[in-house]
Image (spheres, grey):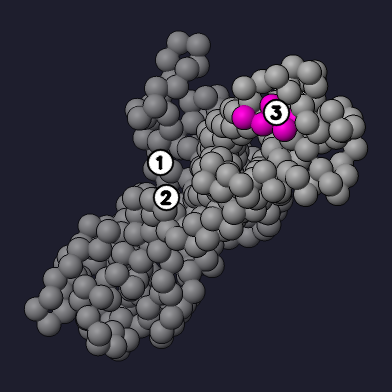
Amino acid sequence: MFSTESLRIAVSGLIANRLRSALTMLGILIGVGAVIILVAVGNGSSRTVQKRIESLGTNTLTVFRGSFGRGRGGRAFVGTQSRQSQLSLGDVTALQNKANAPDVASASPVVNATVTATYQGASYSPQAFVGTAPTYFTARAFTVAEGRFFDQSDYDSRARVVVLGQTVVGQLFGTQDPVGATVQVNGVNFAVIGVTAKKGSNGPQDQDDVALAPLTTVQDHLTGVGSLNQILVQAASRKQTTAAQDEVTSLLLARHRIADPTQADFSVLNQATLLQTSAATNRVFTVLLGAVAAISLLVGGIGVMNIMLVTVTERTREIGIRKAIGARRRDILSQFLIEAVLLCVAGGVAGVGAGLAGSHFKIVGVHPAVVPYSVALAFGVAVAVGLFFGIYPANRAASLRPIDALRYE
């Protein structure tokens, strides 16, 4: 159906109207480029959120004091707490017992303190000052940039040592080397033994704006001996996170002498569940962005159809002459259909280039991540748009009677 002659005539027709052809291709270019860039933005946003969640550990559970209050019918009132628990070191010890929780790799006690740290006249209040155990670093996927983390001997000896995040180091020490220095935390001297590697922000929380010290030391000098704010539980693997959550819930219910799980005085946040929920939400977000961008492709296709109808009208006499000298219906049909497809193919190629180029720039704070299927899909839809919106004008041209076409002025 598509002959070399039809292709030559179609190309000649497009070249003869360069400006009009370029403007028509611009609509397809914008549509294809928008699909690629917006899907890349959605994918980049999804990766950023998942990376932030994974930085907290993908196989961790966080046990909080208190649970959501419940009203009639068991409905939860978000933001209220029905009972206040007393998470204790006894709970941590019980969770560390493999006989009680075989799917739990470690359990770390957590106490939070509000402090002001000072060093040579500089003062700063870290966003988080955490008293915990050495297992906390592994569970939260912290790595050391300089010095070392505190170990079990520091914990047992109640050593006044502290590990600082990058933000705290910048505020207190500037460009100085902090390891080995002594900082005052609420008036108590702490030796800086290490600096954590940069982790970045996790939503509203700067994970580098943190200071960590042995729980025993924090309780002795800052908070006093009391209940824990949290217990950080690390499952043996990501696949065992749900099993570990069930074990933690059952064990703490038994230890706190609670028969009805709906009356639990603690709550457990499953990091893996949060990651799955976030991934599902971001997939929907990415699809919606792609759908919005696809509308511009539809508009571009309508532009192609409009231009092709104008072209058929302008070249009515040419069609009549070609038919009079023997051109068949399919020759005319292929000529105008090829023109429409060429417009969309050229616009699609340019759109792919524009989309890939645009994806190298940071957009609304997000680094776009190009999804290969979006490139193929956008280009394929552009070609399909050319076929779909080119059929009617091409068929209209092919249906003209030679005598009527020759008489057209």
Check if residue 2 falls in the magenta segment. no
Amino acid carrying mark 1 in the image? Arg
54 horizontally vs 85: left or right: right
How far apart marks 3 and 2 lie (CA) works out to 83 Å
Residue 167: x and y in percent read 29, 70
Residue drawn at x 43%, y 66% is 199
Q: State the SS at label 2.
A: strand
Q: Residues within 10 Å of mark 2 (few under 14, many from 20)?
A: many
Q: Which picture quadrant has residue 405?
A: top right
Amino acid carrying mark 2 in the image? Gln
How far apart marks 1 and 2 lie (CA) works out to 7 Å
Residue drawn at x 57%, y 35% is 300
Residue 281 visible, this orientation: no
Q: Are marks 3 and 2 in contact (CB under 8 Å)?
A: no
Amino acid carrying mark 3 in the image? Arg
Question: Which numbered marker is on residue 65?
Answer: 1
179 horizontally vs 348: left or right: left
Give the residue at mark 2. Answer: 230
Q: Quadrant of the C terminus?
A: top right
Residue 237: x and y in percent read 68, 57
Give 320 or 302, whichever is nearer the viewer.
Answer: 320
Residue 82: x and y in percent read 38, 26
Q: Are marks 1 and 2 in contact (CB under 8 Å)?
A: yes
338 horizontally vs 98: left or right: right
Q: Which residues are magenta?
A: 314-319
Question: Which numbered marker is on residue 317?
Answer: 3
How far apart marks 3 and 1 lie (CA) works out to 84 Å
Residue drawn at x 37%, y 78% is 195
Residue 166: x and y in percent read 33, 73
Q: State the SS at label 3.
A: helix
